[in-house]
Amino acid sequence: MTTPQAIFPLPIGIVTVSDRAYRGEYEDKGGPGIITALSELLKTPWNPITVVIPDEQILIENALIDLADHKGCALILTTGGTGPALRDNTPEATEAVCHKMMPGFGELMRTASLQEVPTAILSRQTAGIRGQSLIINLPGKPSAIRTCLDAVFAAVPYCIDLIGGYRLETNPAFCTAFRPKT
Amino acid sequence: MTTPQAIFPLPIGIVTVSDRAYRGEYEDKGGPGIITALSELLKTPWNPITVVIPDEQILIENALIDLADHKGCALILTTGGTGPALRDNTPEATEAVCHKMMPGFGELMRTASLQEVPTAILSRQTAGIRGQSLIINLPGKPSAIRTCLDAVFAAVPYCIDLIGGYRLETNPAFCTAFRPKT
Amino acid sequence: MTTPQAIFPLPIGIVTVSDRAYRGEYEDKGGPGIITALSELLKTPWNPITVVIPDEQILIENALIDLADHKGCALILTTGGTGPALRDNTPEATEAVCHKMMPGFGELMRTASLQEVPTAILSRQTAGIRGQSLIINLPGKPSAIRTCLDAVFAAVPYCIDLIGGYRLETNPAFCTAFRPKT
């Protein structure tokens, strides 16, 4: 494991996983949806490193590894590819590259999404740790992305503290990061 | 993966997993409980394909594979074998034959069952996709079966759409299937 | 699998997993927190078998195996090591030694803890069965331990019944064990 590089503003990986967006048949709305959400949630200056890739497990794995190991992203968010269809491979790719899985993220994101649509249980989204990076799978639709980020984001900065990453500060108008006193 | 066969009425697999029911020491109530529930929940004409097998992992796997790959069942429901006991092997068999796991089903079925009994957390029930079939583990008791099906059934038709299966219509008196507009 | 030994009072394994507690840099509060909670929750006479070990996966595995297979503990509770940090290995050790995983315990303990802190989703705590022993991961802080035990304990005696262990009776002032009529 490498020590975090002093890159500033903080790089955050944003991975759009979609065959159609990759082929240009369809405008990527997930990636921009994540950027809009983070612009409100984060006070710490940050820079998006965006990637658009097809629903191919090995390509998703390579993108996650590159953002975690070589681009110094303490936080990597994916959008798309978490459903039950044949080409939905994002959770498998995430699990393949993570050293530790974080089941609480997927559970809470599904519970929050269930308040909006009963098909929330079809999302297989998960989260995990690779080295000093937290990887979180998000849905494809911007409104669903926001629901999921709002549900879990208060726990994200402390998670990144615990894995030795940068100290993230949230914007109290939108999110109050929680750090237990120990 | 094979394309769905144009079998009509739709075959739905119903697998009772129970040593005692298999040996005839005990009347199978789970299988009939599923049939009663589906008769209310589904408007699309369907036919049950029922199997009663002992709690032996390889036999459960073989039954699931046969119903998915050779009998054309877009939906396969199991009853029994999800607890912590030595002979409870249904979730392991399900995981062994599925190409993708769907953790949201088990989470929501346990949450719904917890409203009724605190021992709901002892159910290890899960769900997953094999080819063009959705496999869902249900409890053994008819009342618990109904609680679980009521909790998740609104998401079942869209899940089957996404894996390329038959279009299921639900009976609005009992369940309103949800299909997101995309 | 061995038959349960007629050890009485019942041995219950309590495993503190903490590098700092093991090195004596820090007083173990988790182990004593579990003992206090069980003293209230259980009516059946019991004896704690306590172990304090560092956050090393193989040492956690060995401790769990010893308590389950050689010390006759029908219930083994761990404290610590369930977070996302590099040295948090308790869930991995638990999964490595269990014959069956019980996902409902972790789900419900996280849901209960979320009522208190948004960082509850960072706990990767799980539970599982090894032979005739139920192993449950608990957090490190005594107050969080109590929240988790209160959430799941009503299901613990019936779980131990189902795996062929001792019949535990709870103290009705603190917990009412639930055993379904079958």
Image (tube, coloured by chain):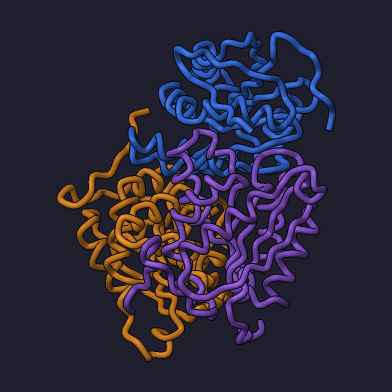
Chain colours: A purple, B blue, C orange
Would residue A108 be found to the left or right of residue C14 on screen? right
Residue B48 falls in image quadrant: top right
Rendered position, A124 above or below B31: below
Residue B171, image x, y percentages: 52, 13
* Residue closest to the eye, B174 or A116: A116
C177 is higher (above) or lower (below) than A69 = above
Q: Position of residue C159 (x, y in %)?
A: 40, 46
Q: Which image quarter is the N terminus of chain A in? A: bottom right
Q: Does B167 sit left or right of A149 as displayed?
A: right
- Name above or below for residue A67 compared with residue B119: below
Residue beneath the point at 71% across and 20% down: B166
**Quadrant housing the C terminus of chain A:** bottom left
A147 vs B146: above or below: below
Closer to the camera, B115 or C70? B115
Q: Where is residue C18 drawn, in percent x and y?
A: 43, 79
* Residue reaching furthest to the right: B2
Residue at position x 49%, y 67% from top? C64
Q: Find residue B17 and report its image quarter.
A: top right
Viewer-proximal residue among A111 and C33: A111
| Identity of the residue drawn at 36% across and 38% down | B114
Q: Nearer the viewer, residue C28 or C4?
A: C28
Left or right, C137 with respect to C149, comes to: right
Does any portion of residue C167 appear in the rendered image? yes
